[in-house]
Amino acid sequence: MNRRELLLGVAGLAAAATAGSVFADEVHAGHEHHHGMSMRNDSLIDAATDCQLKASICLQHCIVSLGQGEKELAACAQSASQVIAMCAALQQMAAAQSKYLPQLAKVAMSVCKDCEEECKKTQKHPECKACMDACVACYKECQKIAA
């Protein structure tokens, strides 16, 4: 294979990839438009995602701190762990537009409230404060739809 054949082959691959990308974008754009009017609760998904992330960061901070002897973070770590699981479920159920979402949101409110209370005790740690704030926001979003 000479250099000219190689360049033509690369150009052909690039053209095919671009065409495929344009086609995929057009299909995806049409798909988004079709579902743009759905009743999916994006604000709850966003709040649950942020809460899960902040709780994960808080949990990791608590684990490190527990290893350094800060035993007062044990309850915070446990509540953050529960929030992580609950928020993952909220994300999935909200994305699926589940008929059980209002019931799950009610339970999630309790989990978020408990975590908020635990993080209040340790909010001198920025990770705990961020988790507490995210739990409050998630609680408020859940409250809007709770059964």
Image (cartoon, helix red, strand yellow):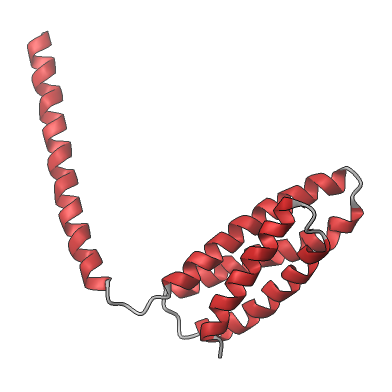
Q: Does residue 68 show up?
A: yes
Tell me, yes or no, if residue 1 can be seen here.
Answer: no
Specify whether 32 is left or right of 113.
Answer: left
- Residue that sits furthest to the front in the current view: 124
- In x, y percent, where is residue 24? 19, 51
- Residue drawn at (48%, 68%) of the image: 45
- Residue at 67% in and 72% down: 112
- Against 39, residue 7 (above or below) is above
Measuring 65% from the left and 54% from the top, which residue is drawn there?
Answer: 56
User: Relative to the observer, which residue lies in front, 66 or 24?
Assistant: 66
Image point 18% across, 64% down: which residue? 30
Drawn side of residue 96 relative to residue 19, left or right? right
Say above or below: 120 vs 73: below
Q: Nearer the viewer, residue 96 or 43?
A: 43
- Residue 126: image x %, image y %? 72, 52
| Residue 20 image-quadrant placement | top left
How many numbered discs? 0
Considering only vertical position in the picture, is 135 above or below 74?
A: below
